[in-house]
Structures are given as structure tokens and as C-alpha cells.
Amino acid sequence: KEWFQAFSQAAGITLHIENLYGDNSHHKIESCFKALARSLKEALEIDQRIKAQLLIEEKMNRADYVVWTDGAIDTHAKQWDELISYLFVESEMDD
């Protein structure tokens, strides 16, 4: 218990560990360490995926159409109508 408290304080993270079952102390401790290792690995993979994301400007340059979702609902409705029209015209051109 003390090791996990020290680790979480040194890392500056909140850590919740609950061992749901088990009789053997060694296996209970081992499962806690393994769960911590898996969660840290998963968190690092998320950071790597985020860093691999394209910048918004690059996404916009590659997109055929952009819908902005940071405005009023009327603006959204207009953009969706424009997108539907754009897609409809594109699909007619493909025929």
C-alpha cells in the first residue's frame, strides 16, 4: 500500500486500486502491479495517438467539406443543409 501511495504522489496522479478477490497475498500484490502497468501503458498509448493526430489546419486542407460545431444551432443547421446539398450534387456528378 505504501509503495502505491508513494508512487502516485511522486507521479502526481490519482490512483485507485481495489483488489476484488484472492487469498494469496503474493498474487494479490502482483495483480495490483500488473493492473497499474497496463493502465500506464494504455495512457501512454493514448498520448502517442494524440501526438500522431494531424493539426486542424492539415485536416481542413485534406477535407472536402468542413462543418464547424462551435456556433449557434441555426449556423449548424445551415452548414448541414449545405453539406447535404454538396453531397447530393457530388453524387449526381458521379452518376
Image (spheres, rainbow, N blue to C red):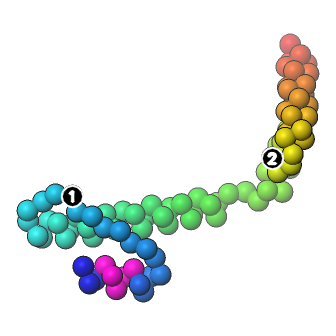
The magenta segment is 4-8
Q: Position of residue 80 (x, y in %)?
A: 85, 33
**In the displayed structure, does residue 59 sit left or right of residue 48?**
right
Q: Are marks 1 and 2 in contact (CB under 8 Å)?
A: no
Residue under label 1: 20
Residue 88 appears in the rendering: yes
Q: Quadrant of residue 26?
A: bottom left
Query: In which quarter of the view is residue 90 placed?
Result: top right
* Residue highlighted by disc 2: 69
Q: Amino acid at mark 1?
A: Leu
2 vs 92, left or right, is left
Considering the whole magenta stretch, tell me its main secondary structure: helix
Q: Secondary structure at mark 2?
A: loop
Tell me residue 16's x, y (percent). 35, 68
- Say if 72 sits above or below 6 in the image: above
Earlier along the polypeptide chain: callout 1 or callout 2? 1
